[in-house]
Image: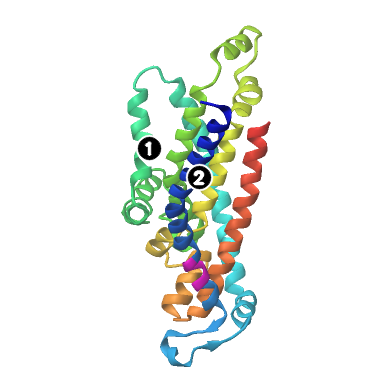
């Protein structure tokens, strides 16, 4: 086969490959673009379900109303606080669990199964479990343990609602972080660790200068993945607090729900949805750049 024919054949193969990708790319774009386009269009409409016949173009009125609403600023703050708490809990807890499992000599496979099991519990089920069996102030496990040491019953969802929801979400995502860190630890160079031990390095120094840098990429990936999903936390809030007391646990996703299905204001809900998409894309872009730099280094 001559070089010319070879290049022609390769070009044809590339063309066939691109043509085979067209249906999947088209379906993916349609699946994403059409809902987003409808949401953007509705965000410029004064569209209330209780008065649907009076729908009309409202310009930027929905966006002005959204940014002037104190509940929106509170929802943004609650979303950020929830994300920060869950990220801190899952990263520190995940690293600790991964180190303990990695050091275990027996039963490591069983520990992995036990660690990952909470990740398969549906968000609504885990919220009910924590609300009725663990955090219930009188009959819950935490209340019973507190009573053993003389502590008064503590109503978690009334006195610390956002912290309570954050604990539930952190419990759900801790297995994911622990599994990622455990996988990274298993690729750690044992000879490097043995050389450090022979040089007299302490356990804390080895963690600071060897283990933690080795986990840097995994930590970045966990932050990026969890942040994208934590922006849309809804079931845990709906089941446990209903966004309250007041708006104490209302995040952006729950605010969109209240605007659309409780206040029947589709225009305002769509505007909040568009803003949420913009925020999610900005955060994803920043973390994607951070991951890229981590991989390059």
Where does the C terminus fall, quadrant-wise? top right
Residue 15 numbered tag: 2
Front residue of this view, candidates 95 and 134: 95
Residue at the outermost bottom position = 54
Residue at the outermost top position = 198
Q: Determine whether 28 is above or below 258 in the image.
A: above
Front residue of this view, candidates 224 and 140: 224
Badge 2 local density, few (<14 within 10 Å), some, or many (20+)?
few
Image location of residue 232, percent across then percent down: 48, 59
Residue 225 lies left or right of residue 104; in this view the side is: right
Does the segment drawn in magenta span residue 253?
no
Badge 1 local density, few (<14 within 10 Å), some, or many (20+)?
some
Q: Residue at x 56, y 74 (%)?
A: 271
Asked whether the viewer can see residue 156, the reply is no
Magenta highlight: main SS: helix
Residue 130 lies left or right of residue 268; in this view the side is: left
Q: Which is closer to the viewer, label 2 or label 1?
A: 2
Image location of residue 71, percent across then percent down: 57, 73
**Which of the two discs, 2 and 1, labels the residue nearer the N terminus?**
2
Q: Residue at x 59, y 86 (%)?
A: 58
Image location of residue 161, percent across then percent down: 48, 60
Q: Determine whether 47 is above or below 114 in the image.
A: below
Residue 97 lies left or right of residue 119; in this view the side is: right
Q: Secondary structure at mark 2?
A: helix
Q: Determine whether 200 is above or below 209 in the image.
A: above
Asked whether the viewer can see residue 73, the reply is yes
Q: Which residues are magenta?
A: 34-38
Find disc 1 in the rendering and name its residue.
Answer: 116
């Amino acid at each position: 086969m001559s070089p010319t024919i070879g290049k022609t054949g390769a070009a044809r193969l590339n063309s066939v490959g691109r043509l085979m990708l067209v249906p999947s790319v088209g379906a993916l774009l349609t699946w994403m673009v059409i809902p987003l386009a409808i949401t953007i269009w509705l965000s410029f409409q004064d569209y209330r379900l209780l008065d649907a016949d009076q729908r009309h173009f409202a310009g930027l009125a929905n966006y002005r109303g959204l940014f002037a609403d104190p509940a929106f600023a509170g929802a943004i703050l609650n979303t950020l606080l929830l994300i920060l708490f869950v990220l801190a809990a899952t990263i520190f807890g995940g690293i600790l669990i991964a180190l303990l499992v990695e050091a275990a000599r027996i039963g490591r496979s069983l520990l992995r199964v036990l660690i990952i099991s909470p990740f398969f519990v549906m968000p609504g089920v885990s919220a009910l479990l924590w609300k009725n069996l663990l955090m219930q102030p009188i009959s819950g496990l935490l209340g019973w343990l507190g009573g053993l040491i003389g502590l008064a019953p503590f109503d978690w969802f009334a006195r610390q609602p956002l912290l309570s929801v954050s604990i539930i979400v952190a419990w759900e995502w801790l297995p994911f972080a622990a599994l990622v860190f455990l996988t990274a630890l298993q690729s750690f160079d044992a000879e490097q660790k043995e050389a450090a031990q022979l040089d007299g390095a302490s356990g804390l120094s080895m963690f600071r200068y060897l283990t933690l840098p080795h986990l840097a990429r995994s930590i970045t990936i966990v932050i990026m993945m969890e942040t994208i999903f934590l922006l849309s936390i809804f079931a845990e809030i709906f089941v446990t607090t209903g966004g309250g007391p007041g708006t104490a646990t209302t995040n952006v996703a729950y605010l969109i729900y209240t605007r659309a299905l409780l206040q029947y204001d589709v225009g305002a809900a769509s505007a909040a949805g568009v803003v949420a998409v913009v925020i999610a894309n900005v955060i994803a872009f920043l973390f994607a750049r951070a991951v890229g730099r981590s991989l390059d280094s």
